[in-house]
Amino acid sequence: MGLSVATAARWVRRWERQQQRYAIDREERFTVIADAVEKVTAHQFRACVADLGCGPGSLAARLARRLPGADIVAVDKDPVLLALGQAHHGDAVRFVEAPVGAPGWTRALGLDRPLDAAVSSTALHCLAPDALRRAYQDLAGLLRPGGVLVNSDRFRGPAGDRAAEVAVQVGLRRAERQRTACREDWASWWAAAAADPELADPFTARRARHTPHHVHNGLPLSHHIRLLRRSGFRHAAPVWQFGEDAVLVAVR
């Protein structure tokens, strides 16, 4: 049994709802990311943008609507999320399977020119430190001069920073209100999706590839900034921040 467009749309809608539990002001973050990418690509013909750890294409699809005519390539290692994204978003986004940060992962992107921008949302914190370093170094080689990496994520703060601790507590209360508004969480979404017969083949592929969700690597924002600069980015700084949640922009 194949995956129908209607079934993919239903699971993507449920994914969008449960993700609201985990990302404070999720739509605002997406807008900030799109603003940055739009500015950098304003004078580019057929801009080229990569979405790293794309899931079912939530951010990639928003960028495709915001940047008509751009080539959007979305990369993830999870066959289930990629199958949902491909069925739901169709030709608006090109989906590819690859583990970001693994040796040789960039070959799967099939790029015919440098990237104008790379983006990510709540994904790069799952990379082990060595994989994150490799990903940043590889991206520095893929982006054109003046291109950007825009990463929206949760960055762990240094212990003892009282102001950051207060902001985190406020953020946790806001996140709790979001969780209350959405009954389904990460684990229950995956359990329900695994029971859908139309997703049997992608789940079989997922089990064969051993693609579990990884925990936070624990790296603070300052570490990411240092690592980006050492990898070849000229500038790196947050342009939006709430406690440990931030949108980090790095300029090649």
Image (spheres, rainbow, N blue to C red):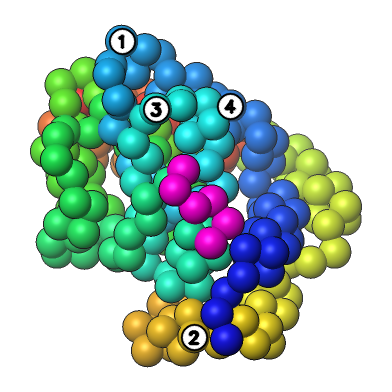
Kindly indicate whether the residue at mark 4 contacts the one at mark 3 (C-beta within 8 angstroms): no
Q: Main secondary structure of the magenta part?
A: helix
What residue is rendered at 72% in x and 49% in y?
20
Question: Which amino acid type is marked by label 4?
Answer: Thr
Q: Position of residue 227 (x, y in %)?
A: 23, 40
Question: Which amino acid type is marked by label 2?
Answer: Asp
Label 4 vs label 1: CA separation? 19 Å
* Residue 200 figure quarter: bottom right
Q: Earlier in the sequence, mark 1 or mark 2?
A: 1
Q: Nearer the viewer, mark 3 or mark 2?
A: 3
Any part of residue 11 in sight? no
Q: Provide the residue designation for mark 4.
A: 31
Q: Nearer the viewer, mark 1 or mark 3?
A: 3
Kindly indicate whether the residue at mark 3 contacts the one at mark 1 (C-beta within 8 angstroms): no
Q: Provide the residue designation for mark 3.
A: 69
Q: Position of residue 169 (x, y in %)?
A: 73, 43
Q: Badge 1, how many Cα within 10 Å: few under 14, some, many 20+? A: few
Label 1 vs label 3: CA separation? 12 Å
Kindly indicate whether the residue at mark 2 contacts the one at mark 1 (C-beta within 8 angstroms): no
Left or right: 223, with 145 as reference point: right
Q: Earlier in the sequence, mark 4 or mark 1?
A: 4
Say if 252 sits above or below 203 in the image.
above
* Residue 21 figure quarter: bottom right
Q: Provide the residue designation for mark 1.
A: 43
